[in-house]
Image (cartoon, rainbow, N blue to C red):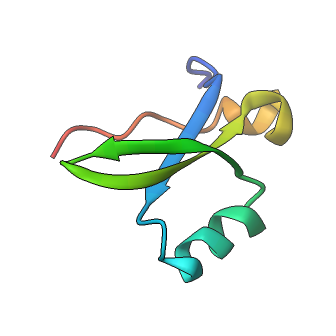
Amino acid sequence: MNGPALERVVAYTLPDNWASRRVMEKCAFTYDRRIEAQGVGQVLYRLDGHRFGAEHAATLRPRKPL
């Protein structure tokens, strides 16, 4: 079953959460910019589709809202 391929996956964390930032970097995410999310300053990382391959991107599904 093929679904739509994702162009980008994003993740964010607190700027001083070095453990989470390191995990994102080990997963091939790259730092993008500082943002404000949930009323707090955060750092945004992203993983573009070309970095993890179209075949892998097709297996990812957007998360359902909680």
Taking depth in this image into account, of 39 and 25 the one nearest to the observer is 39
Residue plotted at (42% across, 34% down):
62
In the rendered image, residue 9, in percent from the top left (x then y), is placed at 58, 38
Left or right of residue 9, residue 64 in this image? left
The number of callouts visible is 0
Residue farthest top in this picture: 4
Quarter of image, res 52: top right
Residue farthest bottom in this picture: 19
Left or right of residue 34, residue 28 in this image? right
Relative to residue 46, is residue 28 depicted above or below? below
Residue plotted at (29% across, 45% down):
37
Quarter of image, res 20: bottom right
Residue plotted at (67% across, 74% down):
22
In the rendered image, residue 31, in percent from the top left (x then y), is placed at 68, 50
Relative to residue 5, is residue 13 depicted above or below? below
Taking depth in this image into account, of 22 and 39 the one nearest to the observer is 39
In the rendered image, residue 28, in percent from the top left (x then y), is placed at 78, 55
In the rendered image, residue 4, in percent from the top left (x then y), is placed at 57, 17
Residue plotted at (43% across, 62% down):
13
Of the 4 image quadrants, the one containing the N terminus is: top right
Taking depth in this image into account, of 10 and 43 the one nearest to the observer is 43
